[in-house]
Amino acid sequence: MLNSSIGQITLQDFNRIKEIEQKAKLPSDDGKVNPTKQFLNQVAVYLTKGKRKKVTYTQAYSAWLAMYWFRERQAEKQNIQAEIRHWYSVNATALSDAELIGLHANLPKIKAQYQILNHKYDATDFESVYDLFLMAYDNEEIATKARNESIKAHMNQHGSGNGNV
């Protein structure tokens, strides 16, 4: 349930307003939905029928917007959970929000380590190698050594400055 200025919005309300939204085929700019006056009127009428006092357009907009943001957050959370499940092989739905945030924040490091361990990078691109190793291990010394090895590999592949470039 969501709390709003018109009281609690139940799962039934949520689903019915989502149906109204889908039928309305609301216009969107850059992926952002723009509710129309007709749509807000339908939402207001529906919410008023639900044993509430008369719901205004502003209240209907507030209720719809709360549900819209809730859906957006839920979709984002599900994407994060799927990524966590893939990379950590854990039941991400059983994790707290704090645990999800922590594991998600650590994903770039995990992905960088995966690239290194599976040799999924260009060993002759010394600038990218430095960035990759620094991300993976958070250690300047390791990243610098990797860059130096990458420079050697680059020189071997492209010539060592003796006119073979």
Image (cartoon, helix red, strand yellow):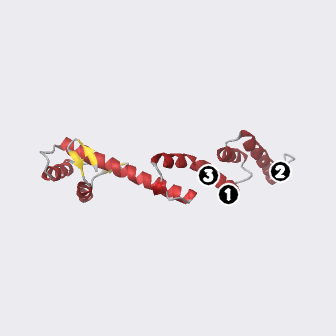
Callouts 3 and 1 close, C-beta under 8 Å: no
Q: Residue furthest top?
A: 140
Q: Residue at x 48, y 52 (%)?
A: 95
Closer to the camera, 139 or 145?
A: 139
Q: Residue furthest right?
A: 162
Q: CA distance from mark 1 to mark 2?
A: 23 Å
Specify the label residue 120 is tagged with: 1
Q: Residue 161, can we see it?
A: yes
- Mark 3 crowdedness (10 Å alpha carbons): few <14, some 14-19, many ≥20: some
Closer to the camera, 71 or 3?
A: 3
Residue 102, percent across and down? 53, 46
Q: CA distance from mark 3 to mark 2?
A: 34 Å
Q: Number of callouts in the render? A: 3
Amino acid type, label 2 = Gly
Q: Earlier in the sequence, mark 3 or mark 1?
A: 3
Label 2: which residue? 159
Amino acid type, label 1 = Lys
